[in-house]
Image (cartoon, rainbow, N blue to C red):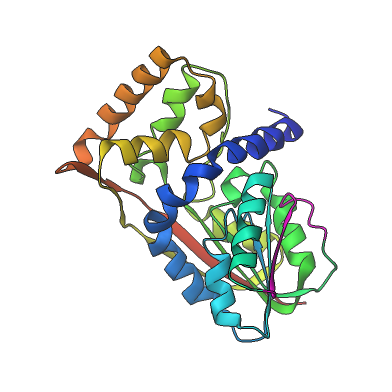
Amino acid sequence: MKPKLQRRIQRYGWDKAADVYEGSWQAQLRPAHDVLLRLAHPLPTESVIDIAAGTGLVTFRIAEQTGPGGRVFGTDISEEMVNRASRIATQRGLRQVSFARMGAEELDCDDNSFDLAICAFGLMYVPEPETAMAEIHRVLKPQGRVAISVWGERNKCGWSEIFPIVDARVTSDVCPMFYQLGTGRNLEILLERSGFSDILVEKIEPTIDYASTREALDAAFAGGPVALPYEKFSLDTREAAHAEYLASIEPYRHGDGYRVPSQFVIALGRKSA
């Protein structure tokens, strides 16, 4: 799939997921977000860019650490995500926090602008991650830090069957390389090739917990990367896809809900010049 088309699918797909995303993934991604923020260690008064910020799950936590004297700028390819995050910032009176719609591969920011760049679970969706990393390197100040989290290896992520289940019913190619960066040393190598040094990598394997079948289905189909192709399904197709997905996660049933295994890879690097 051409990068331009893939970006378009990502943009409108996440627009569709915006209503469900936060409720489906905030608690589930928190263990990885905790490690990401620990490694990144945002400091008071620092300037931070949060790339693929979504509704601000990490952005607003960064703002708590940088304080009113800092500056936090969130970007996302989805206009709906940006609008929601902007409303939250206004409601909370956070004048130091702002959001704009832009893709990770073309950041409309000056060179050497930020002390820290964060990308929490966004880089897997970028058609050209090398270009995105070059942009991150460009906008960081000398000695600036980058912290990135991605999903880990496919065989360690229990919900991974969602992609072939959807692709069998509609051609989507939403995330053809979704697990690549989280496999082996690929994320570390990408940072090295992008000019970052002092690289630290941590891998964690928490469970992704859902209290009910409905929560698990909403997260997988409506609140994530397959939301756009899923919208095209007929009722019968949805029911069949639901049944197949639930069968794939049945080994992880826990009472009325599920405890699905996962792996997250979190990396920190520093711009040397």
For the residue pair 140 and 273, the one nearer the viewer reads as 140
Picture coordinates of residue 175, whole percent (x, y):
56, 36
Q: Is residue 191 left or right of residue 57?
A: right
For the residue pair 239 and 109, the one nearer the viewer reads as 239
Picture coordinates of residue 184, whole percent (x, y):
47, 52
Count of numbered tags? 0
View extreme (front): residue? 91
Q: Which residues are magenta?
A: 95-108
State yes or no: residue 99 in magenta.
yes
Picture coordinates of residue 166, whole percent (x, y):
46, 24
Q: Is residue 15 left or right of residue 105?
A: left
Report the residue at 47% width, 40% height from top. 223
State yes or no: residue 174 in magenta.
no
Q: Quadrant of residue 97?
A: bottom right
Report the residue at 30% width, 23% height from top. 243
View extreme (left): residue? 255
Report the residue at 65% width, 66% height from top. 90
Assign the C terminus to one quadrant of the image: bottom right
